[in-house]
Each structure stands twice: as structure tokens, then as C-alpha cells.
Image: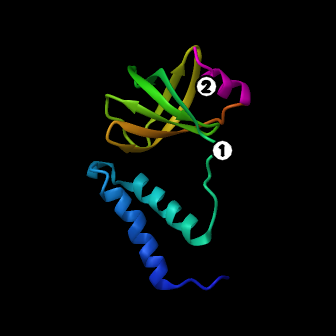
Amino acid sequence: MDQIDPTGVYNVYLEIAATYFTTGDAGAWNLVGERMMFERFHQKIHGQANKRDGPRTRIFRPARLLSCGDTDNIHLLDVSRGGALAHSQSPRTPGEIVWLRVGVMEISTRVVWVRGKRFGSEFLTKLTDAQLKMITVAH
């Protein structure tokens, strides 16, 4: 096992923690936020790559979220095979399971983090190349 400098570990922890407390959304700090922070901490210390599946593709595409009988108009800001970044006027909750409707396609997704009106989501089933192309091709 590699030797890890305790001072360096503490500094990395402070750096990651600071990102959560300087977003201006103190309400987003919860167990999901703690788990995400721990994962980022572990990745930095052990040098593991980001878990994202493939590169992100920047887009600006209207979509809809379906949750508990409610619908919310959103805009997708980027997408990868494993998830998306979106903007919503309605508040989202980390851990919330929602359906993302893009055109005729519906994708089950879990909200992972929320910062203001932006949120990141993880697709419960990774997109195929064909599905990703359907989302990213301009309409």
C-alpha cells in the first residue's frame, strides 16, 4: 500500500468539503452529498479516474422530467452515456428517481447532486450509442 502524507490527505479533504459549502446551497448537504464527497476524496487520494461513462457532450435541449405525477420542463446542458447535467426552475432533491423524457425517449434517472437550479443525474441504465446520438443530434 502506498504511503499517504496525512497533511496532504487533510488538505484534499478540506478542498473537496469547501466546494460543497461554497455553492450557496447549504440545503444540498445531506447523506447523498456526504457519499459523493467521500467518493471524490477516495478518487483523489487513490488516483482513480472519474466514473463517468465516456465524454460529456454539451447540448442545450429542452426535455421534461416526470416525477410522482408531476412534470417539469428542463433544459439538458450536457449528456454522457451514464448521466446528464440539467437546469430546472423547480427544486430537485438528491436521491430522487425521475423519468427524463427527451423527444419520444424516456430514461429512468436518479438525481445525484443539486446546486441552485442545476442538477446532475445518473441514468439507471446506461445509454446506447444510438440513444446518445438521438439526444445529441440537433433537432
Residue 51 horizontal/vertical position (percent): 62, 52
Quarter of the figure with residue 79? top right
For disc 1, the marked residue is 53
Report the front residue among 93 and 23.
23
In the displayed structure image, the side of residue 99 where residue 72 appears, left or right: left
The span shown in magenta is 129-139
Task: Please report whichever mark, 2 or 1, sits nearer to the chain's N-terminal start.
Answer: 1
For disc 2, the marked residue is 136
Which residue is pictured at 41% across the width and 25% down the height? 74
Which residue is pictured at 55% across the width and 67% down the height? 44
Which residue is pictured at 61% across the width and 86% down the height? 3
In the displayed structure image, the side of residue 6 where residue 17 appears, left or right: left
Amino acid type, mark 1: Asp
Residue 77 horizontal/vertical position (percent): 48, 32
Which residue is pictured at 48% across the width and 21% down the height? 63
What residue occupies the far right of the structure in this picture?
129
